[in-house]
């Protein structure tokens, strides 16, 4: 199966694009860079895992992607509190990052149990 067909990859890639588009005018470059990097890390690690040859390797990279989803959610929540991100929009991003993390958790278990 190609990672590009996975709904979780599609959702993570869409979230990453949204983050780039919606924060392009953010003046705190360090925060914006960290936010977009963690967002980009999720679909990138899903892709890297599925390009590997074993379920063990897939699970390892999905675990990294799941960690990035948690990192992203944390950064979004801090961005809201710091006044960098609009609360309503950013809360939906945080929810999406959390849902992506849950899906990745299920995929990790599936690949570890094969």
Image (cartoon, helix red, strand yellow):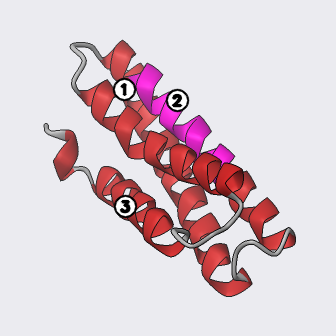
Viewer-closest of 12 and 100? 12
Viewer-closest of 49 and 77? 77
Q: Check disc 2 and report the residue beneath it.
A: 64
| Principal secondary structure, stretch drawn in magenta | helix
**Is residue 73 visible to the viewer in this orientation of the structure?**
no
**Is residue 18 visible to the viewer in this orientation of the structure?**
yes
Q: Tag 1 or tag 3, which sits nearer the N-term? A: 3
Q: CA distance from mark 3 to mark 1?
A: 20 Å
Secondary element under disc 3, as helix, strand or loop, is helix
Q: Is residue 5 above or below residue 27?
A: above
Q: Given this view, does label 3 or label 1 mark the residue nearer the observer?
A: 3
The verdict on residue 60 being magenta is: yes
Q: Check disc 1 and report the residue beneath it.
A: 111
Q: Which residues are magenta?
A: 59-72
Q: Residue furthest bottom?
A: 88
Q: Tag 3 or tag 2, which sits nearer the N-term? A: 3
Q: Check disc 3 and report the residue beneath it.
A: 11
């Amino acid at each position: 199966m190609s990672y590009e067909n996975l709904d979780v990859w599609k959702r993570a890639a869409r979230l990453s694009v949204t983050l780039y588009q919606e924060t392009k005018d953010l003046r705190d470059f360090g925060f914006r860079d960290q936010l977009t990097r963690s967002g980009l890390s999720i679909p990138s690690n899903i892709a890297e895992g599925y390009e590997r040859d074993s379920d063990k390797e897939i699970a390892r990279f999905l675990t990294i992607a799941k960690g990035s989803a948690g990192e992203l959610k944390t950064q979004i929540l801090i961005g809201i509190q710091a006044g960098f991100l609009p609360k309503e929009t950013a809360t939906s991003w945080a929810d999406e990052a959390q849902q992506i993390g849950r899906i990745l958790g299920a995929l990790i278990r599936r690949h570890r149990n094969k």
